[in-house]
Image: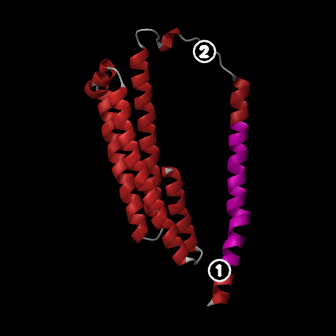
Amino acid sequence: FGVAGLALIWRGVFLERWGFATSGRFSRSMGFKAFSVTIVLWIVGGVGVYAGRPADVRAFLTSGVAPAVLLVVGAACAVIAVGGAYRSITQSGMKCPLISSLALLLVTACIVVLRDLARINELRPVWTLTDTPVNAQWGMFALFVASLAGGVVLLVVLGMKVFPPMAAAARERLAAQQ
């Protein structure tokens, strides 16, 4: 939901860039609302997950250096993401949505690493990472790399061949309406 809110903010940026200022402002406003609600829900959910963990896991999350750093960095990035999303309502351009997107990426990375550390700590009495055999699946990796490369090529082609004519047509329609 939060990423969809950021996508609406980005949509608004491009709509304004293509000459649809009213639709762009509306899209950025709705995107900020969706993004803000999501951040609040993430905080409530995080507190609920923390409260549901056993006491030793909660102690690990509150006393360890790595979890503390991840929590502080994640919280700071969440504040930066919301601030960038809020500023994107009043400021045009790509700077604020880009800052929000990068900050959200860092928040997500912090959450993933923190969750993994908590999981490893919780499972430590019955399982350790060194007990797990590693069997590389190079075919799957090659399939992933090929699909990633195909997606990048598709985005580049869309960006160079499809979107500019669409934007030019939108500008012409706007000029004809005025």
Q: Residue at x 51, y 51 (%)?
A: 3
Task: Name the outermost residue toward the bottom.
Answer: 178
- Disc 1 crowd, CA 10 A, few/some/many (<14, 14-19, 20+): some
Q: Residues within 10 Å of mark 2 (few under 14, many from 20)?
A: few
Please give the residue where the numbered disc 2 appears in the rendered image. Answer: 134
- Percent x, y of residue 62: 27, 28
22 up-or-down from 122: above or below:
below
Residue depicted at 31% across the width and 34% down the height? 69
Q: Is residue 169 magenta?
A: yes
Residue annotated with mark 1? 171
Please, what is the three-letter code of the amino acid marked with disc 2?
Val
Identify which amino acid the numbered label 1 is placed on.
Answer: Arg
Q: Front-most of 137 and 44?
A: 44
Question: Which residues make up the magenta segment?
Answer: 145-171
The prevailing secondary structure element of the residues shown in magenta is: helix
Residue 131 image position (x, y, % from top left):
52, 9
Mark 2 secondary-structure assignment: loop
State which quarter of the image contains the C terminus: bottom right
Q: Could you give the CA–CA distance between mark 1 and mark 2, rounded to whole angstroms?
A: 55 Å
Q: How is the rendered protein coloured?
A: secondary structure
